[in-house]
């Protein structure tokens, strides 16, 4: 007789925001997902069922963070328990994303250089960084919208470029030099 496989249960709730309806996910203790409606990779990383539970662990802290953020404040990230699901490399990239200051942007190349420094000089391709950034399971809170191309192009954002630009403008990012490319992965 085979071993019985346990299915992990994750919890979800919704949040109405200025950029549309958000789906929040918790493992019961911490936030493991935040996706914009229609976002590419929506629900990625969740291996089990997503069960509705508005009171699951982490939701109150995340709702307070989102309320403050959308009201124009700079909420403290450390108050939100985060548990993004991904590879060791992805989690490293996502941790670096949380260090990008509010109202500022960085590039995939700059993140690749930071990773190389953290890994003792081992080079990392900006393309690999882009893949990890694109698969960020906790949008907005882990601010992947603050990453742009080295030439100022608003490269792909899983939630859509209109939302990326809204978030950057909301944070007061100076849009001088930022642009939507006519072709490429951003579209």
Image (cartoon, helix red, strand yellow):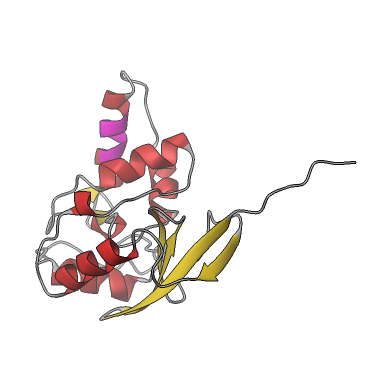
Q: Position of residue 138 (x, y in %)?
A: 37, 58
Which of the 4 image quarters holds residue 186? Answer: bottom left
For residue 154, say whether it is visible.
Answer: yes
Q: Position of residue 74 (x, y in %)?
A: 11, 61
Q: Which residues are magenta?
A: 111-115
For residue 40, say whether it is visible.
Answer: no
Front residue of 92 and 187: 92
Front residue of 38 and 180: 38
Our reading of the magenta stretch's main secondary structure is helix
Please indicate whether residue 41 sits to the left or right of residue 80 in the image.
Answer: right
Front residue of 187 and 170: 170
Q: Position of residue 124 (x, y in %)?
A: 38, 31
Residue visible at 45% across and 56% down in the picture: 28
Which of the 4 image quarters holds residue 73? Answer: bottom left
Q: Position of residue 59 (x, y in %)?
A: 34, 65
Residue 83 falls within the magenta-colored stretch: no
The quarter of the rendered structure image containing the N terminus is top right
Please indicate whether residue 10 sits to the left or right of residue 182 in the image.
Answer: right
Residue visible at 31% across and 51% down in the picture: 81
Q: Does residue 124 sit above or below 177 in this rendering?
A: above
């Amino acid at each position: 007789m085979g071993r019985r496989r346990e299915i992990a249960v994750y919890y979800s709730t919704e949040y109405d925001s200025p950029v549309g309806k958000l789906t929040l996910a918790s493992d019961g203790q911490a936030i493991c997902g935040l996706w914009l409606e229609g976002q590419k990779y929506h629900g990625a990383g969740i291996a089990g069922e997503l069960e509705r539970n508005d009171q699951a662990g982490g939701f109150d802290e995340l709702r307070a963070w989102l309320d403050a953020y959308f009201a124009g404040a700079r909420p403290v990230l450390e108050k939100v328990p985060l548990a993004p699901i991904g590879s060791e490399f992805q989690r490293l990239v996502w941790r670096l994303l949380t260090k990008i200051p509010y109202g500022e942007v960085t590039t995939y190349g700059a993140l690749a250089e930071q990773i190389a420094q953290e890994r003792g000089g081992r080079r990392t391709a900006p393309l690999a960084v882009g893949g990890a950034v694109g698969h960020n399971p906790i949008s907005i809170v882990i601010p992947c919208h603050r990453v742009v191309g080295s030439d100022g192009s608003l490269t792909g954002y899983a939630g859509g470029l209109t939302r990326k630009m809204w978030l950057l403008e909301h944070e007061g990012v100076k849009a001088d030099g930022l642009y939507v490319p006519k072709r490429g992965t951003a579209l």
